[in-house]
Image (tube, rainbow, N blue to C red):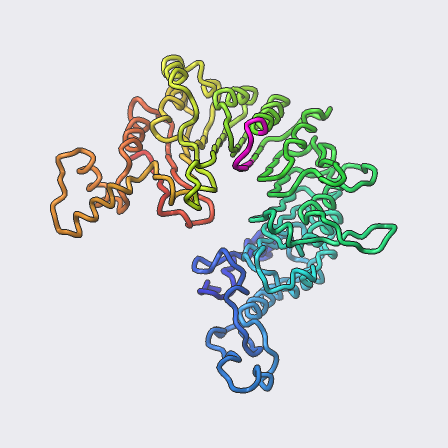
Amino acid sequence: MAPQRDLPPALAIHHNPPQFPKTLRFEVGVEADAMHCVHAHDWLGYMGNWLEKDPRLHDTWEGRSDSFGYQRGRLVRVKYECLAQRTMAMLKRFEDGQLETFIWNYTTCIPSEVLEFLSLKHPSIQSLSFTTDPFCSRFNRWSRTTGLSLSAFRKVRRFSWKAPMGCHFGNITNLVQTNADHLEELEVDLQSWSRQWEDREARVIRHKTSSEEWAKVPASTMLSRETFGLDSGPPGKACFPKLRSLKLTRVPLRDGTTKKTATASSINLAGLTSLTLRMCPYWTFLLEDMVQSTTASQVRSLEILDFCLQTPNVTAVNKATALTQFLDSFDGLEELFISNCGPTPVLEFWKHLVGHASTLKAFVHHQRITDQDDELLLSRKGRDLSDPGISEIDRDRLRHNTAQNPFSSLNLEFIGLTCAPEYLKNILLPFVSKRSLKVLHIRNTGSSTGTSPSCVFDKALELRIIQVEQKEEEVPVSLRDISTAIRERKEWKTPPLQQSFRDFAYWVFGPEGIVSLEYIIAGDLSHGSRYSESNALIFRSA
């Protein structure tokens, strides 16, 4: 089924073996709106069969004189009904019990009849993954129901739900509790969740000794309470005895009311190999408990994202301490991704990687700070720290004695930093004598491109050249950077490079640079091609 603008999904089916597909995946088409549910641009129309014809050509009630078109049959949300019909048609091609994996990455509400059909025909499904729109207003939030039910799925081993609404939290906790004994991978991503949404998503707490009553407990806290057993009752057995991968975004790891915290024993520390905590309140409590545990950590991939602007220095230091103590408590880490705000002495922090020197292959350190220019709205989100915070004295020391560089003991294959190109040479000098580093990612947050100059492209020079060309004047080519810029624009069809980036690229790919390096990636690669105009890929010429 070919993707069409504003119509149901581009579909990919993975065959294994080819004649018996076990995975059904719905993905957003290239031209579709990946940021909103189809309800956001839907319209009312008369029920029809849209398996083949384009619903955009169908009548709508606005174009007719009869009162809401009831004489023509039931009114429906046309695009959503079309989506449901085509999804059901695809599902009915499978034999009962054939599906093992169902992935809904369409960024829209899931038709209730789809999950009902799956629960009846494929109750033994082992993997469920959903990506929805947390801001869809189609359903009444105050009713706290969406008509969905996941109770029939009792053999799920891998479960992921990105961007649920508060009314989905009950579905999530019920499925997690039902499958806790055999769940191996769990991901709950509360995208765009904020304190304002907490106020709107009030929950009802049912006490055993009394009737329902309203409680001022944040919705995300209720989700965490039900998932990790943070209620006021006595602690029970391990929640997830077989969990191998845990990914949480904006899920609090401590209940502010009961004062109970998610513990190492509840997440199967002996078997957990991948841990991702993004913007999770009280994440330090979990790491501290893992350090105190008598069970050695087996984590091989660790990601901590903590972009909390206006973080007091004392709090930032405490968070950094909790992280470094956890890194020092075990070995064997293969991937480490750290994104933090506040003052963090990078050289001191990087020294804690030495304990994982024999295994660590990928390291990302993304630093952000509060922007001092409060007049600009975008600046309130902070900015990337292009200066790594290494003093001139320390830079000279690293330049003349690479053995004092924390990276000298590491054999990294991938490294991602927010450092501007002019600082990277001294930092990466240890890899000149190694043969390990393959990819360098110069990171830049895409949402900051409007307030921060690009470290890759010289947008100011590009504007000057365009203005001269529009006036049909000759561009002066006496300066080396001008002539080079004109050649780059002509050959690459991009803005010219910053001179500092060009100098770094010439060095790192040159005879005195890092001979093993294959690629330099610059920019923000998240959200598909949203920030592609500011991204760059540079590789070694053949």
* The residue positioned farthest toward the right in the image shown: 209
Q: Position of residue 190 (x, y in %)?
A: 60, 48
Any part of residue 332 in sight: no
Residue 308 lies in the magenta stretch: yes
Q: Can residue 300 be seen in this view?
A: yes
Image coordinates of residue 234 in percent, x first then y, are 83, 37
Whether residue 376 is situated above or below residue 332 in the rendered picture: below
Vertical order, 372 against 115 (above or below): above
Of 50 and 314, nearer the camera is 314
Q: Residue furthest front?
A: 375
Residue for point 49% across, 56% down: 34
| Magenta stretch bounds | 305-315
What percent of the width, then of the height, locates residue 334?
Answer: 55, 29
Q: Quadrant of the C terminus?
A: top left
Q: Residue at x 20, y 37 (%)?
A: 484
Horizontal placement of 170 versus 43: left or right? right
Q: Toward the viewer: 459 or 151?
A: 459
Q: Does the magenta stretch include residue 336?
A: no
Q: Residue drawn at (67%, 25%), measured in percent from left and top?
A: 291
Residue 50 placement (x, y as % from top left): 53, 74
Q: Determine whether, in the image, residue 246 is placed left or right of residue 155.
A: left
